[in-house]
Each structure stands twice: as C-alpha cells, then as structure tokens.
Image (cartoon, rainbow, N blue to C red):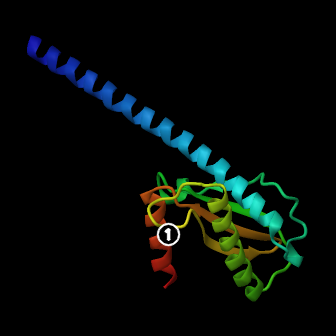
Amino acid sequence: MHFFIWIFILVVILLFFFLSKRILRRKALKILQSENKKVADKAVAACLSHLQMEWLMEYEGHIENSKLLANIWGKGVMVFEYILPVQKVSKKELKQFKKELNHSLSKYAEDNEISHFENNPTFLISDLWFLAPSLHIEVAYISNKQTLDYLKDIDKLEK
C-alpha cells in the first residue's frame, strides 16, 4: 500500500514540475513576442513614414493595430500584420511598394544594429495584399528558426 502512495506522490511531483516548466516557457515566449513586436512596430512605422507613395498619404506615422500571427502559424513565429487605410492601389504599385519597404526595413535594421538570425535579413515582408479599404502587410522579424521555417513554408506555397 505504501508503494502506491509513493508512486502517486512521485507522479504528482513530476506533473507539477512539467506544468510549471511549461508555464514558465510560455511566459518567456510571450515576453519575447511582445519585445519583438515593439521592435517591428517601430521599424515599420519609421520606414512607412519615409516612403513617398501617393496612395499612402492617409498613413499618420504610427502603428496601433498590429497583430502577431503566431496564434495561427505556431509558437515562436515572429510575423506581424499591419493594416493601413488605403482606398485604391494597383498590383504594379504593390510590387514596387513591397520592394521599397523591404529595402527600407533592411536599411533601418542595419542603421539601428538590430540583430538577425544567421545570415538572413532582419525584416522581410512575407505577404502583402490589398482588400478595400485596407492594405495588409505581414512583416517577419527573422529572429529565430521558427520564423525562418515559416518563411520557407510560405515560399513553397507560393510556388
């Protein structure tokens, strides 16, 4: 009988250990996501304010509504969605905008010495689309392997 009591106590201790470890890991991830979101928001806001696009004139120079896409794609993916008010934009303009914003984000990261993962760019636009009356921009902050794997998966889907 004592044997079963000791087994039960051991199982409870192990459950407590694993649950507390999981809670701490989840809390650390939330903190990392929050900090990376602040960095990405600041970079995107700075870069958007420098771009001279006629259809982007309604942008006021600050980011309020960015969202983390990790809940959809998995833990550790640092991709943030930005929604800007835009009335109309052509596919050609979007292509040019994506190119210029990627370049601007790269320069911003270099100028501000923002760290990156391995030999990859720090920021990269993973997706960009217009759905009236909004422009949706998904910016990946490549700070870990999960985000890099996400970008590779997105690239495979687009091919």
Q: Residue at x 60, y 49 (%)?
A: 36
Residue that sits furthest to the bottom in the current view: 92
Q: Could you tell me residue 14's position as x and y percent?
A: 26, 26
Question: Position of 100 compared to 156: left or right?
Answer: right
**Relative to 32, residue 123 above or below:** below
Q: Quadrant of residue 44?
A: bottom right
**Relative to 56, residue 118 above or below:** above
Q: Nearer the viewer, residue 12 or 49?
A: 49
What residue sits right under mark 1 in the picture? Answer: 151
Q: Could you tell me residue 28's position as x and y percent?
A: 49, 38
Q: Could you tell me residue 126's position as x and y percent?
A: 59, 70
Q: Quadrant of residue 35?
A: top right
The quarter of the picture where the N terminus appears is: top left
Q: Quadrant of residue 102?
A: bottom right
Mark 1 element type? helix
* Amino acid residing under circle 1: Leu
Q: Residues within 10 Å of mark 1 (few under 14, many from 20)?
A: many
Q: Residue at x 88, y 59 (%)?
A: 60
